[in-house]
Image: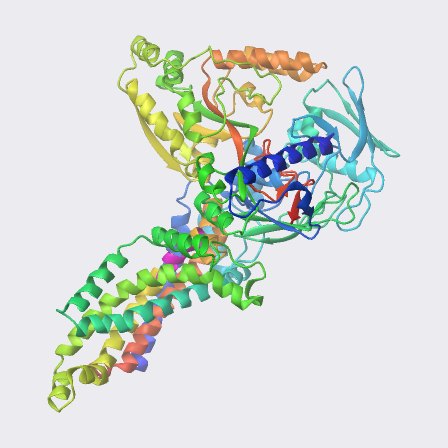
Amino acid sequence: MLRRTALAAAAMLAAGALLLTACTGSAEPGPSETELTADPDASVGIRLVLEPGNLDIRETAGAALDQILIDNVYQGLVARTPDQEVVPALASDYEISPDGLTYTFTLREGVTFHDGQDLTPEDVVWSLTQVRDDAAYRDSARLAGVTGITAEGQTITLTLGAPDSTLLWNLTGRAGLILKKDDTIDRKTATNGTGPFTLAGWKQGASITFARYDGYWGEPAQVAEVVFSYIPETQAALNGALAGELDVLTGFDANLKDQIEAGGDFALVLGKSTDKGTLAMNSKSGPLSDERVRQAIRQAIDKDAIVEALGAGQTQYGPIPELDPGYEDLSEVAPFDPDAARALLKEADAEDLTLTLTLYNGYGTTVSQILVSNLDDVGITLKVNQVEFPTWINDVYINQDYELSFVLHTESRDFENWANPEYYFTYDNAEVQKLYAESVAAVDPDETADLLAQAARIVSEDMAADWLYNGASVLAVASNVTGVPSVNVNERLNLAQLVKSTE
Amino acid sequence: MIRYALTRSALLLLGLFVASALIFFTLRVLPGDVAQLIAGINSTPEQIAAIQQRLGLDQPLPVQYATWIGGILTGDLGESMLTGTPVASELAQKAQVTIPLGLLSMTVAIVIALPFGVLSAIRRGRADGTALNVGAQAVAAVPVVWAGMMLVVVFAVWLGWLPAQGFPRSGWSDPGAALRALLLPAITIGVIEGAMLLRFVRSATLQAVGEDFVRTAAAKGLTRTQALIRHGLPTVGLSIITVLGLQVAGIIVGAVVIEQLFTLPGIGRMLVADVSNRDLLKVQGELLVLTSFVLIVGFLVDLAHRAIDPRQREAE
């Protein structure tokens, strides 16, 4: 399933790229599909934006690690497809008991780790138990409800005290990764997984290199090497691509479409994502504790203008993006209406308001400029405070010392933060917390989605925050490269289907 | 001379000590710490506390400072809190990019500044001399980032002669490729630093032209240019050494910007990344090495000045 979907996407991508080559009408005829042959010795250069601080998939936070290490290097019993479906990975199949309390996985045979050792059922039990029991590990809490982790032959059984509709999905993430039992590698700089790629090198400050793992249990990777170059500046990445040094640019700017496509060697590719441009509003004190003020801010912001300025993505009016269960169009809750916003501010006696927006300085200025101008229209003076990421974590996330904050939350299925009153969103609604708990306990996926949708509607109606846009994954892909995922690449960049062709 | 060298050495050591304390304590003013960053968003206070304890961040600051200095005195610069890699080996690796980049930039700067600086002094008041001087002022005012961008667009994107970004993964095992990767960045820094240096050369030359001994030499039958070159330029050389010493700091700062722009894995880029990761043990080790380097260069320039210039020795 994973394979077929990715391949279909790859084929469409290739077709799109070829069409584009044909359309530009360059002097040299573009390669036609029959002339392209996959080059098994190819090295593919991929631009990424943020370099991880270390490679410790167990302890170190950040999508930069999930993005490249999960699926490619480390795998779990199950994995997620670009369509956000859960499919078997290291387990050849799995079964959930009707009461939702027992999960049975059949572990694949013939799987080896990159150091040559066999994958055993003990490795699975050890990996999952470690995550559950060590609170310092990422996502440890996500396995807290698992009371039993046992193996008998190739059968792995997880037992739960209460049903958990998020468990399978969580097993496709950090919590579910299977590592070698008692491995002695230094996870900060080395890896030992079961995926189609091994870590071949990390030049800190420049690049991470993956090499094909020839002992892979599935279909081996079709390129010999992938080089991730960390280039924060989009312009530098564009120059590198135009100079022929890179094959794929992730985190690209859709507004540079004409420049990247001008030579006919690259095509811009847009994919859906769960990136949520979230404007958090600290409702604990001050003018933002008044729901009318929060609603005024929401109605003052022109979301269509933001999406247009970004050149990609779509509007999103509630906490759940289209790709996640529980999505519902909530555009009617607080539509763009500056007059209504002014009236609300007047009613709340909050005219001539000055607010501070604290955001990470890596986000650029497009969004904050629109916010400043939109809010100015309704009489709110917005001061923009751009800070380094550690400062943001300290001031906004930990100390919750902020008024407004903008964050692009990339994680999928993260509604739980709205049900957590301790989270920096400062949102505390018992009804939402109850609905979320019920959605977790529900056994039927449709029921889960329905409960989440109800909770999301309340969050939006409470004006808990504003959702400025649902970002798109923006990539530029060379015309001789196929198999690059386009959906939610900030979270996962599965390169199993990557192909680079020669004429 | 020996007494001067000893006094100057004592000053150097004091300078290093003060620098170490300044580096350590000013870095602690930065909000946020590496443990919070490792734990990230979706973390609990307990998780952060556990990481802080493991990294020794729960110790009082004076204790942390003493531990660090104790290590330095035994030759241990410490290690990264994120990767565990020793700071010394990280610096040695990144220096393979930054030191050649610095030397290359300096060479470009001197190659531009010396001939054109002298020329613009000799041709003072004429059209070409004035044009050189004005041109140098203009170039010196160009932002490094903009200059780099322009060079990339012309030489990498349009002409395809040189790489637009990055450094060969194999490093200096292919010296040609490595050198090509450094050429555009070095020219970017070198031209701008060279333009500044040019104005120093020009004013030093102008001053030399007015010196008694140059006029005497001219009176004895040399042309003014011959007199300047034979007797005046050694004094110009002296001021240039001083200025070059000062420019080392400028080139390091230039490297921080240019390594970002060209994605070069050098000391500058590492420093920026480490600060934004709050890998303070690593940052303070790096800063101490850089500061020592600048202070030691200044120390050597002073000694050289003393040794070369007879006037300073006689004044003793």
How far across and how far down the image is residue A411, in percent? 57, 29
How far across and how far down the image is residue B106, in percent? 37, 67
Magenta: main secondary structure equals helix
Q: Is residue A427 visible?
A: yes
Q: Is residue A327 left or right of residue A496?
A: left
Q: Residue furthest bottom?
A: B220
* Camera-side residue of A42 and A358: A42
Residues rendered magenta in the picture: B251-260
* Camera-side residue of A413 and B135: B135
Instruction: In the rendered view, tell whether residue B179 sits above or below residue B21.
Output: below
Give yes or no for residue B258 being in the magenta stretch.
yes
Residue occupying image coordinates x 48% and y 17%:
A317
Quarter of the image with the N terminus of chain B is bottom left
Instruction: In the rendered view, tell whether residue B185 sits above or below residue A451.
Output: below
Give yes or no for residue B266 being in the magenta stretch.
no
Q: Is residue A144 visible?
A: no
Tell me the colour scheme of the image.
rainbow
* Camera-side residue of B263 and A170: B263
* Camera-side residue of B282 and B182: B182
Q: Quadrant of residue B135?
A: bottom left
Q: How many marks?
A: 0
Residue occupying image coordinates x 58% and y 31%:
A488
How far across and how far down the image is residue B140, in percent? 27, 58
Quarter of the image with the C terminus of chain B is bottom left
Residue occupying image coordinates x 80% and y 48%:
A117
Q: Is residue A220 left or right of residue B255?
A: right
Q: Quadrant of residue B138?
A: bottom left
Residue occupying image coordinates x 69% and y 14%:
A442
How far across and how far down the image is residue A192, in percent? 71, 47
